[in-house]
Image (cartoon, rainbow, N blue to C red):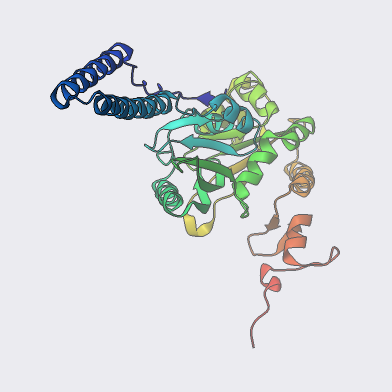
């Protein structure tokens, strides 16, 4: 649910009609008294009338100016229609938040609330310190220059880009927009693969898929994995510990919930972290192995066929190599990324590299 945070309007200055009337009456009486004194002292009634008329004219002009000014001051301050703003950003694909001149959060759409698990105020978001620093710098730059951006921020849900704009009649508000990063992000691709339509198709083919972070905590999973491992396809897709859902016995891995009589599982582990950034997320694909396949060679051959077919379905560029480095399999995204012909074959990964003369 999107959120609008309201602030109490400033109280207007109350009118003082009784005091104003008293001042006007006092001025008229004073002017009449002064005119009478002038008429008695100078014995010139016409001069007294001229003085009285001039004094009344000045008083009337001052009264009109005061009335006009009081009406201007009493006009209600223009208020922002936050309900209208909320309706405009509610269905946006981006995560949108708006902060006021004092840095307080005044509006956020539900995408922002769902992504961050609440209503934190930018730039103090539950993100890595480096990302928070870059977001804060973008906010300061937007306050100064009118707009700023920070690209490729790493979060627990993949890379995001942030765009900050200064807005409002007095340029007092900042609009924060967070979008999926335009840069390539393997983690975001894996999240879509597991939790989207591709995850449902993997489940229909009998493949359980789970995305786990570097600490072993679940980030996402398809409905088949949630049903079999947690007992409910509508369970939270994140927050569980992957290792606690599996049990290993006699070189056989099974789901803890299904007990000892369950089919053993073949697990394909795909590391998604970049080498220069340390351990990252891991994609696990789990496939049932039938107990009645007795011979090890037959089991391995069948598993290899399933594995190649499974890797061919993935949108990620992947290749398999033996221990000696010989390439066994390449899926279509890998072939396209490497610039190879569809029917090309390579023996070693080094065949993809051209040595400089």
Q: Quadrant of residue 274?
A: bottom right
Q: How many marks?
A: 0
Q: In the rendered view, does 117 fall on the left or right side of 137?
A: right
Which of these two is toward me, 20 or 173?
20
- 15, above or below 200, in the image: above
The image shows residue 62 at horizontal and vertical percentages of 33, 29
**Left or right of 221 in this view: 303:** right
Q: Nearer the viewer, residue 17 or 228?
A: 17
Q: Is residue 272 visible?
A: yes
Closer to the camera, 177 or 115? 177
Name, please, the residue furthest toward the right: 343
Q: Quadrant of the N terminus?
A: top right
Examine the rendered structure and indicate whether residue 247 appears above or below residue 144. above
Residue 110 found in image quarter? top right
The residue lying furthest to the front in this view is 43
Residue 293: horizontal and vertical position, in percent? 77, 35
What's the residue at 51%, 47% (across, down)? Answer: 164
Q: Position of residue 237 (x, y in %)?
A: 59, 28
Q: Could you say which quadrant of the image residue 127 lies in?
A: top left
Location of the C terminus (image quadrant): bottom right
In the rendered image of this protein, does residue 282 appear above or below residue 227?
A: below
Residue 2 seen in this snapshot: no
Percent position (x, y) of residue 145?
46, 55
Residue at the left extreme, as displayed: 41
Residue most extreme to the top: 18
């Amino acid at each position: 649910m999107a959120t609008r945070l309201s602030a109490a309007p400033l109280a207007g200055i109350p009118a003082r009609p009784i005091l104003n009337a008293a001042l006007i009456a006092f001025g008229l009486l004073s002017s009449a008294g002064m005119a009478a004194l002038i008429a008695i002292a100078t014995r010139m009634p016409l001069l007294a009338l001229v003085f009285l008329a001039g004094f009344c004219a000045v008083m009337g002009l001052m009264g009109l100016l005061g009335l006009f000014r009081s009406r201007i001051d009493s006009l209600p301050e223009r208020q922002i229609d936050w309900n209208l703003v909320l309706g405009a950003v509610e269905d946006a694909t981006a995560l949108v938040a708006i902060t006021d001149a004092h840095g307080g959060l005044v509006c956020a759409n539900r995408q922002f609330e769902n992504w961050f698990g609440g209503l934190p105020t930018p730039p103090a978001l539950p993100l890595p310190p480096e990302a928070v620093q870059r977001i804060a710098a973008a906010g300061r730059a937007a306050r100064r220059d009118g707009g700023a951006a920070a690209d490729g921020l790493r979060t627990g849900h993949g890379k995001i880009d942030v765009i900050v704009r200064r807005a409002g009649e007095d340029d007092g508000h900042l609009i924060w927009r967070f979008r999926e990063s335009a840069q390539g992000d393997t983690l975001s691709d894996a999240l879509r693969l597991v939790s989207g339509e591709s995850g449902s198709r993997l489940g229909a083919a009998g493949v359980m898929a789970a995305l786990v972070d570097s600490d072993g905590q679940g980030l996402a999973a398809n409905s088949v994995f949630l049903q079999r491992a947690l007992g409910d396809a509508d369970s939270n897709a994140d927050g569980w510990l992957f290792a606690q859902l599996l049990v290993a016995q006699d070189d056989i891995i099974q789901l803890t919930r299904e007990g000892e009589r369950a089919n053993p599982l073949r697990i394909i582990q795909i590391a998604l972290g970049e080498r220069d950034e340390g351990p990252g997320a891991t994609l696990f694909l789990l496939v049932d192995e039938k107990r009645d396949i007795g011979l090890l060679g037959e089991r391995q051959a069948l598993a290899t066929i399933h594995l190649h077919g499974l890797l061919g379905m993935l949108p990620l560029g992947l290749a398999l190599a033996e221990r000696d480095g010989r390439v066994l399999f390449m899926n279509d995204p890998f072939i396209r990324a490497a610039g190879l012909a569809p029917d090309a074959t390579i023996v070693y990964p080094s065949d993809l590299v051209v040595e400089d003369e």
